[in-house]
Image (cartoon, coloured by chain):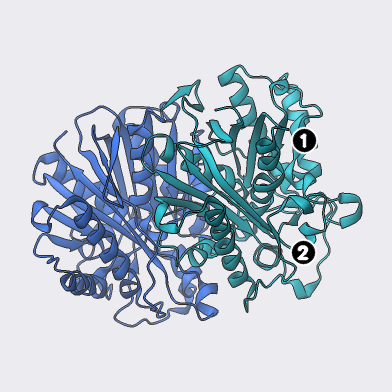
Chain colours: A cyan, B blue
Amino acid sequence: MAKRVGRYTIRFEKAPAIKSYASIAGKKEGEGPLAKEFDEINTDSTFGEKTWEKAESRLQNNVLNKALQKANITPASVDIVFAGDLLNQCIGTSYGLRESGIPFAGLYGACSTMAESLSMAAVFVDGGYANIAAALTSSHFCTAERQYRCPLEYGGQRPQSAQWTVTGAGAVILDLNGNGPFIREITLGRIVDLGIKDVNNMGAAMAPAAADTISNYFSDTGAKPGDFDLIATGDLAFVGSELLKDLLKEQGIELKANYSDCGLMIFDREKQDVHSGGSGCGCSASVLCSYILNNLCSGNFKEVLFISTGALMSPISIQQGQSIPAVAHLIHISNRP
Amino acid sequence: MAKRVGRYTIRFEKAPAIKSYASIAGKKEGEGPLAKEFDEINTDSTFGEKTWEKAESRLQNNVLNKALQKANITPASVDIVFAGDLLNQCIGTSYGLRESGIPFAGLYGACSTMAESLSMAAVFVDGGYANIAAALTSSHFCTAERQYRCPLEYGGQRPQSAQWTVTGAGAVILDLNGNGPFIREITLGRIVDLGIKDVNNMGAAMAPAAADTISNYFSDTGAKPGDFDLIATGDLAFVGSELLKDLLKEQGIELKANYSDCGLMIFDREKQDVHSGGSGCGCSASVLCSYILNNLCSGNFKEVLFISTGALMSPISIQQGQSIPAVAHLIHISNRP
């Protein structure tokens, strides 16, 4: 059961337990600092398929199967799956999950999808609407480039504020009972748009949404940044996370050494030429389902705030001169029951 | 509180109440058989905006405001809004709801979005995760044509199995207490794909998903088609609803005169040249939020099954030779508490 805390936060009295989780990363991600944390590194960007879009569907299919396997259950035990991706009409998800036979609730939250799907799964499990629920998402560098920017063959250059879409996926299986880690609280975000129009600067567009959700969480709960072993945003990368710190500082909230961004953790910016850092639904998903949950399971982390951030524009809205709306959803994960 | 009934169905013990609802329809829809049922008919397809996509965002904005106004509440009273649309990256929704300030969970269920969003809203309200929740969606003929098919200027011809995307929107505000109608049960659908590849025959692609969800509901609950005043699918139109009847008949479920499809109700196929009938997220949304709920409120209908149907392909998946996966979500709405 849950109660509402303040205007925006939901607290689970008996926190849903993470039964299993899985991450799959691509070649470049597998050469980064988190290499040892992933369940699987696939060095073939095609994932054995003939198009990039089919590759991304395969990735979602694989990561769900991996998580089910780690939980030692079949799809027939899962009452609902919440998932989405960045592609037009979320085809990474619909084709990837087509054969699972699990009741399906499709989401579109752009790169906020991991936190959004996990929030929905937590609510369904907490209230008994599902006994077991799955949450997952993915992104693929090659599908995202050709859809949002240029076909890969163009070899287009980008400014230093641009980010590198992660090829990767993460999946979580939730159960009401278990050894954890546990989903203790969620804060669902509002759409925030401060007028950024530069599609090569997603971090700047998303930072205000992250600041809004984080500050709502702290004001709803009375918690402080120091209460957490890690506060991780999803894919603000270098530019966006600096802006986030400034925006929160203006509100009297100081993010210190326990703050980082999944887009900064997954790549080595010095060596991997990813400009501002990583991005994509798969960025926060694969970092959550490897480094973050591994450390919660081992007891290195006790309390974590995980905030996936999504930019809600499309190439068409940008061509029409619109600015970039963004949203961020927050999850408080703990290793105590 | 709720309990799971069978493998797929959730039954709300104290059914969430529809506090208000609103529908807005376009010019062609306003010339159809349901003209008198809509809250508003807008004869200007631009909705006062300079692009079709901005027009669709305006439509979502307007229908939410209309529903809030009918409930006599402000956005600040709404704890969460579930919404989505057909456009790439769901920009109808993200720009349409940008200024609302309501915590936002974006969905992508294609034309199943009205039933999907209403299901999520019902769960959140039932379990106390939200005091008041909103569910809405839209479609617009001109955005859908140029994105899924051809720019309007081409004046492309289509076969008789093709459908006409509804310009319209519907929004529902849910509360735990109220005079109803009430959301009694939901059955969330699985992705079903029987291999249809013809994008001019969405009804055929979606009918198997509708059959799967409807038959799951009947087998979970023991209910029978005769128990309902109306069983309404979302946008199978003429071709798809005939197929649905055949598919269900094979399973021993006979749909009779109390069955219809929102895509058949909203247009007069004899006079309005819409080929197989209406389609789009806005089709089932605007029919639910006018004719169906009006009749539940007046007591003409006591028990209704509402099943929105979505085709989950994209132009890219079709170009890559993939078939069309589909999903259907079912809601049992009743006027008894």
In the rendered image, is residue A312 in sight?
no
In the rendered image, is residue B74 in sight?
yes
Q: Residue A317's x, y, as percent?
A: 59, 56
Tell me if B328 is positioned left or right of A41 in this view: left
Q: Would you call the spot at circle 2 few (<14 residues within 10 Å), some (14-19), or many (20 or more)?
A: some
Taking depth in this image into account, of B97 and B116 the one nearest to the observer is B116
* Image mark 1: chain: A
Q: Residue B176's x, y, as percent?
A: 29, 29
The answer to whether dots 1 and 2 both sit on one chain is: yes
Label placed on residue A27: 2
Residue position marked by numbered label 1 in the rendering = A243
The residue located at (40%, 62%) in the rendering is A101
Does dot 1 land on a helix, a strand or a loop?
Answer: helix
Q: Residue B240's x, y, as percent?
A: 26, 72
Tell me if A301 is positioned left or right of A183 in this view: right
Does dot 2 land on a helix, a strand or a loop?
Answer: helix
